[in-house]
Image: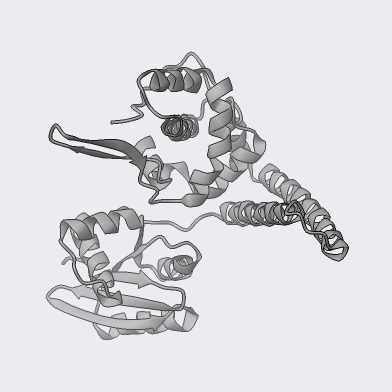
């Protein structure tokens, strides 16, 4: 007997759930909180749905709660990159864009594609992710306040307040950075992975920590291309016939935090990492624009990180990594 399938369209306050149970179909909306999760389970029992496979899109903190709860209750759970659902919807010529239609689309994707099962992140990972994202928020706030200080304001009161806040933010940033490294030192797996990543020229301890805080576990990705797609670093080409030849652009459908944190390390690696330096020089010589080259360097850096974490061996500048930047 085939398992029942539910597609869950996740919003901040609600869950739209579409059930496919053999020939039976049903739809209902629940609150995105513990009470709603319990009502969802009762609804499944009422509909005699056994061996349920629950599928939902990865929407960060909004989807984490229901995914963890259903997993703890013994359901099979898959958390899907939204880009896959979007592509599936296009292939099915989806025209209606409603919460119910989206939930049904996710359910049918799950039925046809049978996606890989999800497991909850470890406590070590969740704490690291919270710390690196807090650091990112503080650094954004610091940049905003520094820009305000340099905006030309003449008010002594405003200037004094900005300087006080900037000093406070700088102190907070230092504290969080120390907390990040202390946390990694207490988690043997994270510490080992950080040591592997910093063997890559262009990747320091903080960058390695941020990478590990955005990649739950390397084994969830089948290959480096899948990881690059997760980061939104795969190129989108515009080729048609012999006349349409537009420049390739990034899909930018994926983890924006991961994509953002790779920018400065890629700039550094383009200069100091022998593999990435040679790679970028070839791209420039073949006519790629500087921004395309930086994007390719970001992707190459992620490919290197994947290979090192997957193999458990540090960076070797003499090892030829067979990665096609634009294919």
Looking at the image, can residue 40 be seen?
A: yes
Residue 67's x, y, as percent? 42, 66
Of the pair 286 and 223, the residue shown nearer to us = 286
Q: Which residue is at a point 34% across and 58% down the rendered structure image? A: 82
Q: Can you say which quadrant of the picture contains the C terminus? A: top left
Looking at the image, can residue 223 be seen?
A: no
Q: Which residue is at a point 39% across and 17% down the rendered structure image? A: 285
Q: Is residue 41 left or right of residue 313?
A: left
Q: Is residue 62 left or right of residue 203?
A: left
Q: Is residue 74 above or below residue 228?
A: below
Q: Is residue 274 above or below residue 260?
A: above
Asked which quadrant contains residue 193, the reply is top right
Q: Which residue is at a point 58% across and 36% down the rendered structure image? A: 264
Q: Can you say which quadrant of the picture contains the N terminus? A: bottom left
> Furthest-top residue in view?
318
Asked which quadrant contains residue 310, the reply is top left
Q: How is the image coloured?
A: one colour
Of the pair 224 and 46, the residue shown nearer to us = 224
Residue 204's x, y, as percent? 64, 33
Q: Which residue is at a point 57% across and 56% down the rendered structure image? A: 126
Residue 25's x, y, as percent? 18, 78
Q: Is residue 201 above or below residue 237?
A: above
Of the pair 92 and 125, the residue shown nearer to us = 92
Number of disc labels: 0
Residue 111's x, y, as percent? 20, 62
């Amino acid at each position: 007997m085939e398992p029942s399938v539910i597609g869950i369209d996740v919003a901040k306050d609600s869950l739209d759930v579409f059930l496919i149970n053999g020939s039976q179909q049903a739809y209902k909306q629940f609150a995105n909180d513990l009470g709603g999760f319990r009502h969802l389970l009762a609804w499944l029992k009422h509909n005699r749905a056994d061996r349920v496979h629950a599928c939902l899109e990865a929407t960060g903190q909004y989807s984490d709660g229901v995914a963890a709860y259903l997993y703890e209750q013994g359901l099979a759970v898959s958390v899907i990159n939204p880009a896959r659902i979007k592509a599936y919807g296009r292939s099915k010529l989806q025209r209606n864009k409603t919460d119910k239609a989206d939930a049904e689309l996710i359910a049918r994707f799950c039925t046809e594609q049978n996606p890989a099962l999800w497991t909850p992140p470890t406590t070590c990972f969740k704490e690291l992710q919270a710390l690196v994202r807090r650091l990112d928020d503080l650094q954004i706030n610091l940049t905003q306040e520094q820009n305000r200080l340099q905006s030309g304001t003449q008010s002594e009161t405003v200037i004094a307040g900005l300087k006080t806040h900037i000093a406070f933010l700088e102190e907070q940033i230092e504290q969080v950075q120390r907390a990040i490294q202390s946390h990694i030192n207490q988690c043997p797996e994270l510490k080992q992975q950080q040591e592997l990543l910093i063997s890559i020229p262009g990747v320091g301890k903080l960058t390695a920590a941020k990478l590990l805080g955005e990649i739950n576990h390397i084994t969830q990705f089948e290959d480096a291309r899948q990881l690059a797609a997760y980061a939104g670093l795969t190129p989108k080409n515009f080729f048609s016939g012999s006349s349409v030849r537009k420049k390739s652009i990034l899909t930018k459908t994926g983890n924006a935090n991961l994509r953002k944190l790779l920018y400065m390390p890629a700039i550094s690696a383009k200069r100091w990492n022998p593999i990435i330096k040679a790679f970028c020089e070839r791209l420039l010589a073949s006519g790629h624009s500087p921004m395309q080259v930086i994007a390719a360097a970001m992707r190459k850096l992620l490919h290197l990180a994947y290979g090192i974490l997957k193999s458990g061996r540090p960076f070797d500048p003499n090892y030829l990594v067979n990665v096609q930047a634009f294919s």
